[in-house]
Image: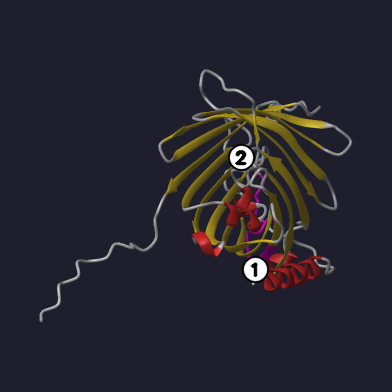
Amino acid sequence: MKHGCVKILFFLVAVWFRPLTLTAQNINYSNWVENSINRNPATAANWSDINLMGYYRNQWPGTSDFVSYSASALVSFGRTGSAAGFTAIRDVQGSGLIAYTMLSALYSYRFPFARYWQASCGLQVSYSAYTTQFSNLTFENNNSSASFSNESRMGFGFASGIELSFNNQAWYGLSFQNPVTGDLATTLPGERAIDIHYRSRIRLAGSFQGIPTRLEPSLYLQWRPSATVMLSGTRFDMNKILAGLYFRNNLRLQFDAAIILLGTRFGNSTVFYCYDINLSNAGSQFTSLAAHEVTFSYRLKYNGKSKKKGAIKCPKF
């Protein structure tokens, strides 16, 4: 099975380097750790049980110009080391003038390859739709927008990835967002992307008022032909309370945003809230507003097939 994963990964890498022009639209995740399956399908194999996840982001609060939603369901198959799931993403710009919708299915498989190391590989297949409603544009001089036509394009896309984990304490990932095919490939000036990530889990000595505390630093890097985005920082995990600070910048250390993360766990549910503070030089009334992002997850535990046996009747002699 693991040899098959390697073959699939290399095949998709080869496809990625073909001279095509488009990938699915990239959505920025401030809380990328909890939304990692949307950037690297290989990370799904490191989740457990059944997970239901929801995501909401408002890039410019006070307006409805850049809003993103997503919903995911992920099932882990326990000892087989595999996981499967699906994701639906909806991104709306300009109050519906531009809309992007994606439905995807993913599969990931994990296997050990050294004493403390495990590897997982994943594949994601998506179907995307891109629509525009430019006929609804309005102008100050009341000119007609008849010269702008509405569009609706659709196509398939692929993503592949691999993740290495060390002793369940550190994770290193690499993924490829591959070009979309079909009519959609001739519509958008999109770009392919390579994603690299690192995260670790460090148990701090002692505890805070009897509560075990962990430090979880992480680094996420997305490379595209036109730009590179880096997201780095750390969060503290104190059982039911989580808090973190991250920064988004490019490789020239030009900072775009500082991100404050707060989270809480109650029962099988976890809620995260991210507040993006603008640090760029852009001075518009919109970009000066901080973005809001909410991630919700619910973990449903299951025990698989019941091993309970019924009563055995005594034989008659």
Does residue 316 lie above or below 69 as drawn? below
Does residue 145 lie above or below 10 as drawn? above
Q: Which residue is mark 2?
A: 65
Give the foreground label among 1 and 2: 1
Query: Residue flagged by tag 2: what amino acid is it?
Result: Asp
Q: Which mark is residue 156?
A: 1
251 sits to left or right of 317:
right
Helix, strand or loop at mark 1: strand
Which quadrant is home to the N terminus? bottom right
Q: Nearer the viewer, residue 312 or 251?
A: 312
Residue 133 visible within the image: no
Query: Residue flagged by tag 1: what amino acid is it?
Result: Phe
- Which comes before the other along the chain, label 1 or label 2? 2
Which residues, given as a range, are shown in magenta?
143-159
Seen as rendered, the residue at the extreme left is 317
Q: How many marks?
A: 2
Q: Position of residue 4 (x, y in %)?
A: 68, 73
- State how far apart marks 1 and 2 are (Cα): 26 Å
Q: Position of residue 181 (x, y in %)?
A: 70, 70
Q: Nearer the viewer, residue 219 or 258?
A: 219
